Image (spheres, rainbow, N blue to C red):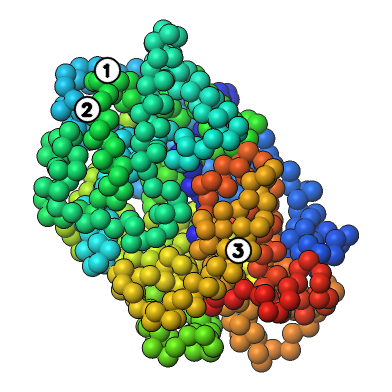
Amino acid sequence: MRITLALQFFACSLFLAVTAGAQKREEPILPYSPSLNINSIDKSIDPCENFYKYACGRWQKDNPIPPDQTSWSVYAKLYQDNLNFLRGILEQASVNEKGRDAVTQKIGDFYTACIDEAAVELRGADALKPQLEAIASLKTIRELAPLVARLQLYTGGYRSILFQSGSVQDPDNSEQQIAALDQGGLGLPDRDYYTKDDAKSKETRERYLRHVQKIFELLGDAPETAKKNADTVMRVETALAKASMTRVERRDPYKLKNKIGMPALEKLVPNFDWRAYYGELQFPKFQILNATAPAFFQELNALLSSEPLENWKAYLRFHLADSLSPYLSAKFVDENFEFYRKYLRGAKEQQPRWKRCVQYTDHNLGEALGQVYVRKVFSPELKQSTLEMVQRIEAAMEQRIRQLDWMSPETKQQALTKLHGIRNKIGYPDKWRDYSSVNIARGDFLGNIQRSAESERRRDIAKVGKPVDRGEWEISPVTVDAYYNPQMNDINFPAGVLQPPLYDAKLDDAPNYGNTGGTIGHELTHGFDDEGSQFDATGNLRNWWTKEDREKFDARTKCVSDQYSNYIVVDDVHINGLLTMGEDVADLGGEILAYIAWKDATKDKNLQPIDGFTPEQRFFIGFAQWACANERPEDLRLRAQTDPHSPAEFRINGVVLNLPEFAKAFSCKPGQPMTKPPETVCRVW
Ligand SMILES: [Zn+2]
């Protein structure tokens, strides 16, 4: 991914009175800002000293982080503009009049129920009553399985209760969907939060314990009981965390593969009634499943016998309420904000309710909202021009592969086959997801959330045993991000990321290639980073490298990770170069490809300086300005542990350092910070 929208399930809370605005508003429009903005440049800084600060310095001064945000960036700002725009669409769709089409009615009623804070407040925690009663009436550990299955349905993708399950592409046969199990069950953002011994990690665990206690109190427990229950949750989660794989381990696709049959699963976790679990979820019959992280499931099995039933009831009550807190009454919403968004990520204020409601509509009915969005902002001409850019970047990749001096002809042939197998997905899916079976009620916000989650989960489960649908998208059309999926071998660019100030149809090629061309190259390079390069053209996990070529490749990616590991994120926290390796390789490769493609696209044009900048300088400024950002220390710290992307400054400076074309464009002298001696330059693709 170019950026990350991960951790959005932590987004939430603080009671802000916003009146339900269901009046018809004017036709919304997206504001325009250019993809190269000379007013964002800080000319007091030498581009050869710190290029990011040079290209983004004024932007940083002019764009302080809004109090309701955990960081602020060109991407985040565009997403906020999208939210504002979508608010207009949703307020229009909310008007309950005859003649609304089915899609408009779904998104309009969902938004209406969300914005009706008084109704949400009135229900309080009662909304959880049926599920809390089901937990209370558990009689044996054996009965846990079907209940966990049901709770996982309602909490959907927001949080995995105990573990994750669903369907995945078979790593050995990318045409086939199989059942999958994976580690999960934690309330903190990563397993390392439970295992690290530094002072800050200890403080965070103390703070989390208080948060868990507070949730129990909100559910009606006396403070002493709540404290005891919080200790239980912490003990169970810590044991699960210790048995969980690290994020760096999870970058090795072979470590994620563990295909077993039902008898082996029952042997691995005999204390859990898997047949009841899968029966409850109506899983299609299957012979094989991918059970990632067997050590985690072994630990789960041990815990199922060492922890008494009462403790499991506490664990389930907490995770049910905590994962659904954003959709409950104000005291839950506030507590969720206080811990997850304020303490962990540094936000000062809750986002206004309308903003949260637009995001929830996007998360739950993304391809319904997306249909209306693309009709307004994504013309066939825009689709065509961005597709042409994608094709030029792919042609640049082909040229690069053919010219590589370190790779053998055999491996080159395989790399080209993989490149030619990549599917380009631009703007939005060819076939929209069908939400007709999801019942959306105008007066039942939590119910809408749970029914959408259930529908999404059932859709995922129903895929088990079926052929893969290669037309599917993982993110909605309004999302300001892009991704590569190694098993699909496809690159995906939603309409939301192909708007100014990223892709700017009003501007010339230089900043567009520097910016969006680089994003396209970034996603394409993911197919050939340390992780993606282990999958072949059809998306199977299969080694297509000669041993010698792979060793040379590993030495080249190590050059990148060594460089980034030296950068300091915040205080004494360094970038974990092994975690960010794939993204850093993609950032570097992407910009090289964009540069080649841009030169090719403009070879017959007589390019002239504009605003005093040469075409090459404008290419690089356009590149840097996609990443202009202000970041809070809390958020930087959290992301250093969880986010495979490096902080914004290093995503620019770390790249230009390896591009002699940059030093030439800005006449940087050897020895200046944005240059490297030629023999130490990192280059993978
Ligand atoms: Zn990426």
Residue corresponding to mark 1: 310
Is residue 226 left or right of 183 when viewed as pictured?
A: right
Q: Residues within 10 Å of mark 2 (few under 14, many from 20)?
A: few
Q: Residues within 10 Å of mark 1 (few under 14, many from 20)?
A: some
Q: Is residue 189 above or below residue 640?
A: above
Q: Quadrant of residue 371?
A: bottom left
Task: Report helix, strand or loop for mark 3.
Answer: helix
Q: Which mark is residue 305?
A: 2
Is residue 48 left or right of 21 when viewed as pictured?
A: right
Between residue 627 and residue 216, name the one nearer to us. 216
**Residue shown at the point (30%, 44%) measured from the top left:** 295
- Which comes sooner in the sequence, label 3 or label 1? 1
Q: CA distance from mark 3 to mark 1?
A: 48 Å
Q: Can residue 599 be seen?
A: yes
Q: Which mark is residue 562?
A: 3
**Residue shown at the point (30%, 20%) measured from the top left:** 311
Residue 165 in percent (x, y) is at: 27, 45
Q: Quadrant of residue 19?
A: top right
Q: Is residue 632 above or below residue 44?
A: above
Residue 129 in percent (x, y) is at: 30, 18
Of badges 1 and 2, nearer the viewer stands 2
Residue 214 in percent (x, y) is at: 47, 18
Please state which amino acid type lies under the numbered disc 3. Asp
Is residue 270 left or right of 470 when viewed as pictured?
A: left
Q: Are marks 3 and 1 in contact (CB under 8 Å)?
A: no
Q: Residues within 10 Å of mark 3 (few under 14, many from 20)?
A: some
Please state which amino acid type lies under the numbered disc 1. Glu
